[in-house]
Amino acid sequence: MTQAPTEKMTPTPDPARPHPLRAENLTVAHGDSPPLLEGMNFVAKEGEILGILGPSGCGKSTLLRHLVGLAEPRAGKVILFGEDIFSEGNRSLARARRKYGVMYQSGALFGDLTLLENVSAPLKEFTRLPPKMIRDIAFLKLSLVGLEKAAFQLPANVSGGMCKRAAIARALALEPGLLFLDEPSAGLDPITAADLDELIMTLAKNLKLTFVVVTHELRSIMKIVDEAVLLGKEVRGIAAEGTPEYLARESPAPEAIAFFQRGKK
């Protein structure tokens, strides 16, 4: 599904509102092992597409688990829309989960449910809306990602790109202001990946959404990301940050040079 190209826009956040995401002195680890990432500070501003970048094994997936509340940090805070999501245990985390959506790398759709039923699932779990309204909202979310005609298909009967779009539609079900996407272009052919990039940019612009995108795909990074946080294996934290253009062409950080110059002779 080819869309008209969308120009990357410079976000203009409202300074009176807290950032959708703020990490303060964040330290994360696997269980009792030594910290994988330490002392990280970064924000995702309103309407921004923030990229979390880095080579394999640098801790991107571990960081994402902490940002979405699947694991509690060793130290520091994850603050969503002004609230520390771990400040009151399960209560603060439950409140936070109504404000963000997540698309995991595989899509993580329920294989025995249609795309419509998958998108309906969070509405059934977290709201008391009547069935017809849930169905209508789910159709609307599928239409936002171009899948209304595939609503009654099972995930196994649609393409990988369509599964990822359906996962984004499900992440949008509860009207979040913040979406986390884990490697959205992974496993997709270049045309499908480009179409998905266009969709992400369109949603960010039209719905005023903030995105946090974990990715290593250079083409997508240069196309959609406004600001980026580059993780490094040696520094155990943030190796460099800035716009993709700055990181690719001007940053003196060895990790940035290695990341953006890979594959070039």
Image: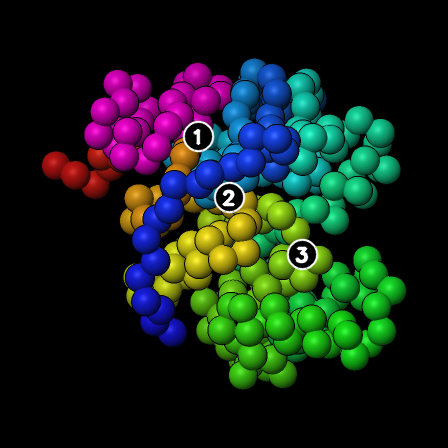
- Which quadrant does the N terminus fall into? bottom left
Between disc 2 and disc 1, whose residue precedes?
A: 2
Mark 2 and mark 3: Cα distance apart in space: 14 Å
Judge whether residue 63 can be spotted in this image: no
- For label 2, the residue is 47
- Chain part drawn in magenta: 229-257
Between marks 2 and 1 in the image, the one whose residue lies nearer the viewer? 2
Q: Residue at left 70%, top 38%? A: 69
Of 85 and 55, the residue lying toward us: 85
- For label 3, the residue is 175
Residue 41 lies, with reference to residue 61, above or below; the image says: above
- For label 1, the residue is 229
Q: Is residue 163 left or right of residue 66?
A: left
Between disc 1 and disc 3, whose residue precedes?
A: 3
Between disc 2 and disc 3, whose residue precedes?
A: 2
Q: Position of residue 252 (x, y in %)?
A: 26, 18
Mark 1 and mark 3: Cα distance apart in space: 26 Å
Q: Which numbered dot is residue 84?
A: none
Secondary element at image label 1: strand
